[in-house]
Image (tube, rainbow, N blue to C red):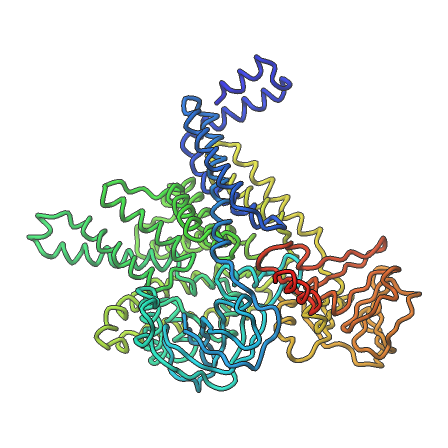
Amino acid sequence: MADTAVTSERVGFGPPWAARILAALSECLAVEGERRLLWLPVFFGAGIGLYFALKVEPPLWPGVAAAIAGAGLSFALRRHPAWCEAALVLTVFAAGFALICETARERQAPMLQRHLGPVTVTGRVADIDLAEKGWRIIIEPDPLAGLEPTTRPHRLRLHIPQTSDELNPGDHVRLKAMLYPVPPQILPGGRDFQRELYFAGIGGVGYSYGGARRISGPEDASEDGGGWAEHLRHLRTEMTRRINAVLPGSTGGFASALITGKRGAIAEEVKQSFRDSGLSHLLAIAGLHLGLVGALVFFTVRGGLALIPPVALRYTIKKIAAAATLVVLTCYLLISGAAIPTERAFVMNGVVFAAILIDRLRISMRICAIAAGVVLVLDPASLVGVSFQMSFGAVVALVAVYETFGGQLGRILHGRSFLAELVGYCAAVVVTTLVATLGTYPFLIYHFHHIAFYSALANVIAVPVSALWTLPWGVVTCLLMPLGLERLTLIPMGWGIEATIWVAQHISALPGNVWATPRLPALALLLISLGGLWLCLWRGSWRRWGMVAIAVGFASMMLTRPPDIVIADNGRFVAARAADGHYFVSGDTGEKLARSLLAEETGETVADWPEAGSGAEGGLDCARAPCLYTARGRMVAIVTNEAPLPLRCAGIDAIVSQVPAGFRCRSMMTVIDRIDSWRRGAVVLWLDPDGITVESTNETRGDRPWVPHPRSKREQSRVAAENQ
């Protein structure tokens, strides 16, 4: 590779200083050797990321054409390693872009654009999960009254009460439901439920009035039923029911999460305590769970075969145990629902046990790269999900640290007595927790806007309980369940779960545990991610430059500021930021979701809107209608009803209205009303001495399939006439 830079300097291609920089870069890359291959999944993911960064839906052909061209160049330039590798980078980048374009095209389905109901819904149950109160089902609906066939969502996610019939995947049901569009973003750059559910094939949500009634079962369906996948979902549902019959409440929900991946029965306050204590990873089947299950099965099978001399002397029992472990892990993957962390852990553990079969055991960053590539090929949309990011953030950091400092840590933590071994084990858990936590902090801050200060303490206590007690009982539970004897093992398993819940609740309640953080911009997260990969994937001294990118990314958090005013949900929700940071919220009781999302996205508390006639408080004065909001020398009139309309345009800088505000003042100032919120999604305003900045969620996301495109009745009539 250095020859390329030297040649460019000789022929005068570019200035000499550029050639010297290129030569130094080429020399560093040459020293890294095969480590360069670790970047192929990164460039594949970059192609996927480009798709999500665009504001228009791209066609498929550019990605396919670039991938084919890159592959051809790679073959043509195979005698020139530097150029061949550059062409290979183009190939995988374009392949990632083409794959996500095709995935989005295949999953394209209508999204519900308006409230509908109460309406009678019939359809086929695709999946079901026990919820805290009742069940949550995913249904493939039949034609719906009031919707054209072309606008009917392919799937709906509905909450049904406990009075419903006992349902299973494949059943045909009837219920009366209220249907809603998928909850939109509350802030630009916030969590995008519409994108998440679009790629899950879900076009609407809602709840039922009264119980859901079973019309027919899977055995009565046509021949084009769900096949083996439906039978697998039925098995998971039945296992979950049997677990929760023995362990009710959050304890059973935790046990179901560990075995079948269904955690809907866990109370929301328990889930929050796990988030605030840094133990959320125990609720997701990932590397810890599959690693422990794999180790338990491997050593149990190998130890059992070693007790049979004819087998131990004639066969390689180590490979037999590895093969048996692969079978068990495959079953665990299928039963657990194959979530993103589970897929990643399965690939990594599978590579390890497959390596035992061919006598090539080595845990390295290459296994992590293989796992990332496999997960992205199977589900490219997972790249922008929190599960993928946190899972690989933790494992890349752990592998990098133990690759570099594993020998030193082993010598430091290894002891010669039982007490020394115990202390060393606890220290290893602390080190592992700290490394994994640091690896996930950027994604934790970006998605959840807080960090848990005492997570290391919680993991030191809870991880050994799960590893040495809870998970082993869970494995035995799966073995006894076909015999109907699961109660014998679920009860002691529940003791370990209750201890873990106790740890999560008490540590999350410690003073100063949860630290709210400023919002992390998407570009900053990208910069931190690239810096972290640069630091972890390379081995040479130049990898330290990754720390600069990480520092710059985190420093950019100081430049962000929560919005001063938010208007969302077609104008039904308005929030104004007080001087102390909390928000006054104007909205009825139906805006609970919007309130909670705003509190989560900003890390601030929310308070009720001041009553009419009250004095000024926190920059908001509602002594007279309309309310006047003042911040940094700017004044905004916030209209909550039609009484003060029409407004005088003089003396204010902007108008935010929960009702249609007309056109009188729009030529003079910023005016945002409920019609703007209907068209543009949630609209936010920042007030500054030099002006007012306005952003909306739909405009920042662009013209994408999951972004609503509301049309008035007049526009709908015009489009219908054009299509005739």
In the image as oriented, which residue stretches furthest toward the left?
310
What x and y, as percent, mark residue 484? 24, 77
Left-right relation of 314 to 270: left
Residue at x-position 50% and y-position 21%: 2
Residue closer to the observer: 606 or 377: 377
Left-right relation of 555 to 289: right
Query: In this picture, is 707 found above or below 133?
Result: above
In the image as oriented, which residue stretches furthest toward the front?
724
Q: How many marks?
A: 0
Residue closer to the observer: 289 or 43: 43
Residue closer to the observer: 358 or 590: 590
What x and y, as percent, mark residue 307? 12, 57
In the image as oriented, which residue stretches furthest toward the top?
10
Quarter containing the C terminus: bottom right
Query: In this picture, is 70 found above or below 475?
Result: above
Residue at x-position 59% and y-position 70%: 181
Left-right relation of 617 to 150: right
What x and y, as percent, mark residue 598? 65, 67
What x and y, as percent, mark residue 296? 27, 59
Q: Is any atom of residue 408 visible in this view?
A: no
Q: Residue 258 occupies which quadrant of the picture?
A: bottom left
